[in-house]
Amino acid sequence: MKMKTKYVVTVLVAAALAGCSPAEKKAHPTLAPQTLPAPVLESLKRALTAYEETRALLARDELKGVDEAASRISAALKDASEGGADLPPQLTEILEEGARTSQSLAGATELQEAREAFGEVSRLILVVANVDPRITEGWHVFECPMTKTFPKWMQPSEDVDNPFMGQAMPTCGVASDLSVAAPVSSDEVSAHIEHAHEGEAAYYTCSMHPSVKSDEPGTCPICSMDLIPVSQEEVDTGVIFVDGERRQTIGIRTAAVTRQPVSVHVRAVGKVVYDETRLAEVSVKYKGWIGTLQADALGEPVDKGELLFTLYSPELYAAQEELFTALESQQRARATSAPGRADYLVTAARKKLRLWDISETQIERIAASGEPFQYLPIRSPVSGRVIEKNVVEGASVEPGETLYRIAGLDKVWVEAEVYEWELPLVDVGRPVEMTLSYLPGRRFSGRVAFVYPYLESESRTGRIRIELDNPGLELKPEMYVNVDFGEERGERLVVPEEAVLYAGPRRLVFLDLGEGRLRPQEVEVGVKSGDFYEVISGLEEGDVVVTSGNFLVAAESRIKSATTKW
């Protein structure tokens, strides 16, 4: 067993220190931000000018001219170190070290040697750049995942131009920041070794072929790579160790779990439609012919009781004559001993006209005229706009045929469709804000009036209705509207969206436990607010979670953990 432990220690130490230059093993202090004196700032900007010339030469695989540009970097950094009596001693030491490293860069005789020295110059300049943001105004930081030197560099252009890979891979690199990761130390290596051997290795596996498992260290039978140890703790919990260098290489970033105001916004597209309670159809219950047409155009406004058209109907004409006959009989009966014997005839004639939608006022007018009207006026039952017209002058009409449709537009509905999971957020009474693309700057406010009790079968969406006043008739049926349902939920515990991983029905994050240890943690998340998820359970305020590179971390955790974790 001692022989096995010794082998694993050798593998881990080699893996941790592989590719680390001497400068990577030396930690630089974190310097407090400050405003540098003008002479120091000017010297540093001269150094950056020469630094950019050096970077451009290396990106073109050119060594000629590097010595002269690097010498100017060295001179400018030396001037900066001597430019202010109030500079912190640590900053002065770093500037002096940068001047010496630049001299080494100037003396490089091979491209690879120059690139390694350039990486160290970049590291020192980034340390200094964190002190005063004015140093790097207008500059962009990039990171190369392929180089074994310090992987970051700066350049004024936004287009990647890699000085470490040259023309072989000129666009290799991703946008980064000014941070300088802590180097791998012997303490970290020891912690990794100690962690890997808590309770001894459960088995050995290949990072490329996790199906390979061995009780003894050795090489992978598929790809011949060295097998890596997996401890029992890693099998049980999925905890993995990622040192500072590997974090930098795979781009791991973290963020704290915090409390902040949570607001939920559901956005949907709606359509303006007619208020169905303010729709009316005009039809007649008898056959006839149109006489004069008053409302003769679509969209025309009409008031309740206003004349729409006149109508001649033989049946209606005969019904009027029946009324006159009944009135004559009633008049003759008044002079007899049974004066009320003809009253039922008048009542029946009047009722017949009323059942044909002739108003009491019109009936009185007919009775007073003494003779039937050939054309009777047909009036609007409601106020609104003519939205359908199916008649012209002289046309014949049939009983029950729709002659006009009239809609009141001073109130309209907006119907919007939302996804199934959004339905609980749009209950009746919810405030709504609406905008129209062709009315910029205008916002319409309303509330959800009704949620339809079914889903649209094809789109699997639910339909909701919003009622709006429309006094200026700005909202016209068939217009499309952008609908925003908002809700303020107050301050809640939140985690960045990119930290959450999906594992079937479960949601996981990776907790940073410190000392390079990362552990998968199951969480329950609520609503999404901007770039954050509400945390219902599984995390506490102040916990640190992985937000970038977590898919690579998850892959390694899957290799080492029990299958039930995933």
Image (cartoon, rainbow, N blue to C red):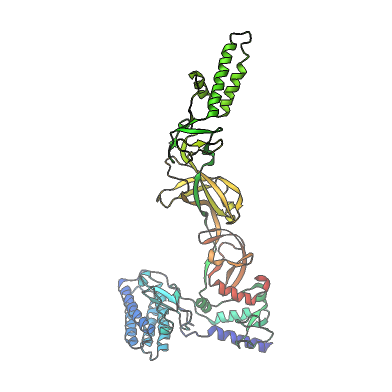
* Residue 270: % across, % down: 50, 51
Q: Is residue 220 above or below residue 142?
A: below
Q: Is residue 182 visible?
A: yes
Considering the image in quadrants, where does the C terminus appear?
Answer: bottom right
- Toward the viewer: 491 or 449? 449
* Residue 503: % across, % down: 62, 68
Position of residue 36 in the picture relative to residue 334 (left or right): left
Q: Residue furthest bottom?
A: 109
Query: What's the residue at 44%, 48% (across, down)?
Result: 443
Considering the image in quadrants, where does the N terminus appear?
Answer: bottom right
Query: What's the residue at 57%, 81% (across, down)?
Result: 189
- Toward the viewer: 84 or 398? 398
- Toward the viewer: 92 or 429? 429
* Residue 507: % across, % down: 61, 65
The image quarter in which residue 508 lies = bottom right
* Residue 396: % across, % down: 50, 36
Q: Is residue 342 above or below residue 140?
A: above
Position of residue 294 in the picture relative to residue 340 (left or right): left
